[in-house]
Structure formats: structure tokens, C-alpha cells
Amino acid sequence: MIQPTIGSGGTHCPYCAMQCAMDLVVEDGRLATAARDFPTNRGGLCRKGWTAAEPLSSSVRLLTPLMRDSRGAPLRPASWDEALDAVAAAFRAAREKGGPDAVGVFGGGALSNEKAYMLGKFARVGLGTRNIDYNGRFCMASGAAAGNRALGMDRGLPFPMTDLPGAGAILIVGSNPAETLPVIVQYLEEQRRHGGQLIVADPRRTATAQMATLHLQLTPGTDAALALGLLHVALRDNLVDRAFIEARTTGFGAARRIANAYWPERVERITGVPIAQLVQAAHMLGEASTAMVLTGRGPEQQSHGVENAHAFINLALALGKVGRPNCGWGTLTGQGNGQGGREHGQKADQLPGYRSLANPEHRAAVAAVWGVDPDTLPPPGPSAQELLESCGSPDGVRALLVMGCNLLVAAPQTERLRARLEALDVLVVCDPFLSETAATADIVLPVAQWVEESGTVTNLEGRVLLRHCLSPPPEGVRSDAQVLKALAERLGRGAYFTADHRELFEELRRASAGGLADYAGITWERIEAEQGVFWPCPSEEHPGTPRPFLDAFATPDGRARFFAVEHRPTAEEPGPGYPMFLTTGRVLGHYNSGTQTRRVAALNAGDPEPFVEIHPDVARSLGISEGGMARITTRRGEAVLRARLTRAIRFDTLFVPFHWGGRGGANLLTNPALDPTSRIPEFKACAARIEPAGNGVTTDTSIGADA
Ligand SMILES: Nc1nc2c(c(=O)[nH]1)N[C@H]1C(S)=C(S)[C@@H](COP(=O)(O)OP(=O)(O)OC[C@H]3O[C@@H](n4cnc5c(=O)[nH]c(N)nc54)[C@H](O)[C@@H]3O)O[C@H]1N2
Ligand SMILES: Nc1nc2c(c(=O)[nH]1)N[C@H]1C(S)=C(S)[C@@H](COP(=O)(O)OP(=O)(O)OC[C@H]3O[C@@H](n4cnc5c(=O)[nH]c(N)nc54)[C@H](O)[C@@H]3O)O[C@H]1N2
Ligand code: SF4
Ligand SMILES: [Mo]
């Protein structure tokens, strides 16, 4: 029997940026999710969505704060007052030693807009620290930077997903939405049914590539060369839209000169994509009356991630396929609130409304809303990876508060990071579960899960959505906002903060007013009545902006900008000792660091352990068999995983999903080389070797299911 739960109204999925609409129901006495019809998911959910209620009543969720009596002592239950007092005392002690910047804050794209906003304000006003950044730096930073520079605004998709079926051709570069945004597939299928062409560029023949008209199986790290080759062919074969370039863009000349040197033979040599396919793809995109170019983490999580994104924006601009109906470049946002989470101030250099902490006018505008002197706001701080690198060093971060990231699974170079975290005076983690990172913390604060509080999130289309509180948090658990408010009080800054999510949203509206990501006209009531509101939305009379670039781009002169970018090799190319490319990513059944989905029995049954994909011919030559254990070694470390032999991967490439910790962790291996602009680590390409791990070795089951 299915019954609705407490509260009225629905919610949205706790996982990916599709933010499928769902209800929470009681089915045979247990909480369960039910799909809700909505303009985005149209009644669909993927298997993560169908099982999303399970972590709510998991037997291993945290129900009391935990702390240690000394370093090395086990975590023991503590009262909230004892734990919060200890956190505040540790923050004060760190500040006495190293000043306000000695306390660091690390956020995440799973946090609602209200919480992300509050976390940024807590760092600047509650702590006065410049050291705050978040996991979006590992995720959207390259696409966001390129979008801001080229189009004047980072709205992941500058169109609703219902525009996808109307595109004559779609090029998806390094994203596997069939597994990572599964419910969006219905739009791609519709596009194909309407006769549209789908091109997928990925080193693996993914589930998405299998849906495509054309699969470009490029060498990892060669995305810019591919884009330049496509532009070269478009120029050569007169597929570019000169009227559009003239009327709506600047900087084409320099980009064209570079593309002229990427003749197809050269591009085939660099990317491994056959000339015929390159030419075919350029013609599909150029000859379609409408087309879209969408990038994912494949090209973006590279040490040239921003240039890669620019190279594809250049292509879309040159073809005149941006800023017109059923056209556009977009970056496919990943996390549930990956879009909103990058707009309201948990980023190192940012204030709410996508304002800049380096801009005096922006500082003054936000300081006025916060009731503080703009001069007291700290300057921009270091990026995520640099913040983590400074942990425990004498003039670096000595106390770190983590809210919404499982660093010891998600950040590069796990072993080095572990040492940095151990060097801290105190590590504090707020999480519903004892994640790998929480397990190493000095103080762990158990917080509510998505459906246990109300709040807004912004999906991959820039549509602001409302999640209702539908189930009370269990006894002993508090909300992230209550934690921050309680800490602010103990630090003598309580008067600046509310823990009420609706009040927080009202404050966010004021703080974002006049900014690029303007939420001033969005109310919870409007979101409910209009099935989401697209930002920018500067007033309550404003209808919201589903397609921001139709009339003009958001740059000062209204024109989109070409950036003259070259192909550059990855920071670490394969060579002697490390002959293969290693790339990392995701599978359908698990979500990010796996803290949530590894607690779901059905998902664990499908994907119980870490693995490596390898081509069977390569595996055979190395003596690695299907289901056997293999050891992967890079210059950072080694991991032991089960081998999955598949002809869907290139000969020169290994693929490891990153959802597990322990000795199968992908980030034991990855290269922390950073993009100079976005500061994103190079998760998608490094040099590796693989060999059989020998008899008797199994995967580390201690890191699997414990639901
Ligand atoms: N099931 C599931 N869904 C998710 C998530 C999850 O963990 N699990 N996470 C969410 C989040 S936070 C994000 S950011 C998104 C990510 O969504 P995607 O970007 O779709 O995910 P990834 O698997 O990281 O990478 C996509 C593809 O990039 C390819 N790739 C690797 N190297 C290269 C390269 O050099 N060039 C190119 N062109 N491609 C390359 C990989 O083979 C992979 O198929 O997914 C979101 N949705
Ligand atoms: N090798 C490799 N590494 C990667 C990537 C890759 O492709 N390859 N992708 C990167 C990307 S794109 C991303 S986004 C990151 C994601 O990796 P993480 O940043 O670790 O993200 P999650 O696992 O989604 O969530 C982190 C923690 O937040 C908790 N959490 C969820 N909701 C809340 C909340 O409301 N409040 C609090 N306090 N906690 C909450 C979860 O329980 C979990 O423990 O990983 C990055 N790391
Ligand atoms: S597609 Fe994403 S938002 Fe929708 S149910 Fe699956 S994980 Fe949740
Ligand atoms: Mo992400």
C-alpha cells in the first residue's frame, strides 16, 4: 500500500543535475520514492532515483555527533553542545595561531542554494577567512570559466532540455549522459526519432556512444585538436556562418588562423579519429539548420580543460549555432545543485549572484545586505586543490570544516591528501554518513538529508526548483544551517545568521539582486506555481530567462568571444614505464564518492566493487583475465581492482570509475596537475601501467555495502 508522507508538495532527487521530480511515499511500511510528472523528467527516474529513499532509514546513518578524546583514539558519541563547543574552541585556537585564514571551509554542489549561500557568508562574515572553496572546482570549473569568458555568463545549458529534440545535430563531447543523466536520454531519443544526428566523442564506446549516429573514439586529452580539426574542415568546406560571425562575435580572425593549421591528417595523427569521420562530423554539424555542442567532464577535467571548452565554443560560434533557437553550446552540469552551488558564494573568488570578491562594487553591494563593512570581507582565496595542499602547513589552513564533499575519495592523490589532513590541528566533517573523510575526522556532525529539509536547487538548465521537507529528520540529527548558526553564535557572530531556509532564500534574493545570477524575482511560491523559474529573474514581474542568449550575449558589448586556443598535450603523456592512458569517470549505479549509493543494497548488488576497463587484446598480452585482479601503477601510487575486459575501450586506455575508497580508489592514481585558469585537476588523463595482481588478491570489501 502506498501512502503519501508528511508535508505537501513534492521534492527532487538527491543526486544528479537532472533533478527529477519525485514524491516520497510509504510503501509497505518503508519510505520510498515515486516519480512525479514534471517538465524535465516527464515522469521518469533512473535506478538511483527509484532507490533514493533507502539511505534515509539506513542503519548506518549517523544519529549523534562523534569526536575523539585524542589523536588516534576512536571516535565516540558526544552531545551536540560538547561537539559544537569543541569545534568553536578549535577554530578560535587556530585563529590565535595563524589569524582568520587559519580556518578553512570546504563545500559541495549537493548543498541547496540556501546552504551554499550560508556557507559562503559563514566563511566571510562568521570566520573572516579567505580559505573557502568547494567540490565544483573538481567538476564544473573549466566549463564555467570558458562560458563566462566567451559568452559572458555561466548558465550550464542556456536553454531548457525540451529544446534538445529540435536540434538537427548534437555533438556530445566527453559526457556519458546515458549513465550520468539517464533521464535526459528520452530527449536524445526524441531528437534521433525526428531525424536528428547525434555525434559522441569519447575514448570509450559508452552507452551514449552506442545511441549515436557517429562515434569519434578519440585519444584521451586530444579534445582541442578534435575541435580545431572540425573547425578546419568547416572553414575549408564553407560551412561557417559568416553573417553570424560578423554580427554577433569578436575575435574570429585569430581563432581561424590557428584552425587553419589543423589539417585533417594532422588531427587524425593527434586524436586517432579517422579523417573521414572528422569530415562527416563537421558536415553533420555545419549542414544541420540547428545544432548543439555539449561538453562534459571528459574534455573539462584536464589541465587544459578551459582551452578545450573554448575550442568547442569556437566551433559552435563559427557554425552560427549559438544564441539561436534549438542551438547552443552547453556544459552538462553534474551535481544536484552543481549550477546553483556555483553561483552564491562558496567558491574561493565569489560572492552571491555570481559576483566577484575582487570587485569593489560587488563587495559593497553584498556587504550592504550582510550589514558589514566591505573592508572586512576577505580577498579571494586559493582554489580547492591549493587550499588542501596548504592544510597543516605553518601559514596554511590549520582547522578545516567540510560540508558536502568526501575528499578522501573525490580529490586527487589520496595518500598525499591523507597526510595533509592528518597534519591539521582539527578536521570537522558534517555528513549524514561516516564517509571515508568523516572516518578520519576529529569531530563529525550528523546532518539531515535532502528530503528532511526544505530548500531550492538549480538544475542543469538553470531552472530553480523547490524541494519540500517531507520527512522529519531523525532524533539527534541537525541541519547544516543549524550547525553553522550554532558555530557563528559561539564565535560571537550569531546576529548575522539565520538557520531558517526560507529566510535564507529571501536574503539570497536580496544579495543576488543586480548580479549575473539574479534571483531577486524568484519566490518559493513562484517556483511551485510555475514548475521552476529560470534565472536571471530580476523582479517578481519578470518571467525568468530560459534562453538568455537569443538577443545578445552577456558580455559587455553583447558579442560572443572567440578564444585563440591550441591543442596542448596532457600534463603526463604515456611513455616508458607508464605506457597507457588512465582515465576515470562514472557508472550508472553509483553516485560520486559513493557515500550515499554504497548504502543502497540494490545499487551495490549491481556494482559491488571497483574495477578497471581494459581492451581484451591488451589484457591478454599482459596476462590479465576477465574477473582477475589487476594492479595499476602511476607516478602517484597504485590501486588493485578487478579487470573488466571490453572491446568498447581504446587499446591505449584504461578506465576506472571513482566511486570507491580503499585500495581500489581511482584517486590513488590521478594526476593533480591543474588547469591554469579553472584550477581543475587532470582527472581524465594520466600515464599508467597495468599488470596482473597475482593469486589470492581480492577487492577490499570493507569499503562496500554496509547498509
Ligand atoms: N550515475 C552517475 N551519474 C552522475 C554522477 C555519478 O557519479 N554517477 N555524477 C554527477 C556529476 S557530479 C557529474 S560532474 C556528471 C559527470 O557526467 P559525465 O561527464 O558524463 O561523466 P564522466 O563519466 O566523468 O565522464 C564522461 C566521459 O568522459 C570520457 N572521457 C575520458 N577522458 C576523456 C577525454 O580525454 N576526452 C573526452 N572527450 N572524453 C573523455 C569517459 O570515457 C566518460 O565516458 O555526472 C553526474 N551524474
Ligand atoms: N578520479 C576522479 N575524481 C573525481 C571525479 C572524476 O571524474 N574522476 N569527478 C569529480 C567531480 S565532477 C565531483 S562533483 C566530485 C564529487 O565527489 P564528492 O565531492 O565527494 O561528492 P558526493 O559523493 O556527491 O558527496 C560528498 C559528501 O557529501 C555528503 N552530502 C550529501 N548531501 C549533503 C548535505 O546536504 N549536507 C552535507 N553536510 N553533506 C551532504 C555525502 O553523504 C557525501 O559524503 O568528485 C570529483 N572527483
Ligand atoms: S537521472 Fe539523476 S536526478 Fe533523475 S533519478 Fe536519476 S540520479 Fe536522480
Ligand atoms: Mo561533478
Image (cartoon, rainbow, N blue to C red):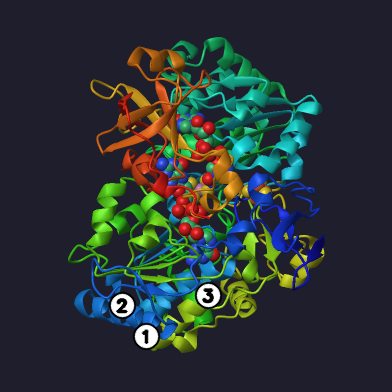
- Mark 1 neighbour density, 10 Å: few (under 14) some (14–19) many (20 or more): some
Report which residue position mark 3 lands on: 477
**Residue 406 x %, y %:** 42, 56
SS type, badge 1: loop
Mark yes or no: residue 323 visible. no
In this rendering, the label closer to the viewer, 3 or 1: 3
* Lower position in the chain sequence, tag 3 or tag 1: 3
Left or right relative to 655: residue 531: right
Q: In the image, is the residue at mark 3 within 8 Å of ligand 2 by its beta carbon?
A: no
The image position of residue 159, as x and y in percent, is: 70, 46
**Position of residue 532 in the picture relative to residue 420 (left or right):** right
Badges 2 and 1: C-beta atoms under 8 Å apart? yes
If you read the primary sequence from the N terminus, does the residue marked by circle 2 or circle 3 appear first?
A: 2
What is the C-alpha distance between the residues marked 2 and 1? 9 Å
> Closer to the observer: label 2 or label 3?
3
Q: Amino acid at mark 3?
A: Val
Front residue of 263/338: it is 338
* Chain-order first, disc 2 or disc 1: 2
Residue, disc 1? 491
Pointer 2 residue: 91
Q: Is residue 125 above or below residue 180?
A: below
The answer to whether residue 268 is above or below residue 6 is above
Asked if residue 503 shows in the view, the reply is yes
Between the residue at mark 2 and the residue at mark 3, the CA separation in whole angstroms equals 22 Å
Q: Nearer the viewer, residue 176 or 638?
A: 638
Query: Which residue is drawn at the image coordinates 46% and 50% (left, top)?
Result: 593
| Relative height, residue 664 to residue 678 (above, below) | above
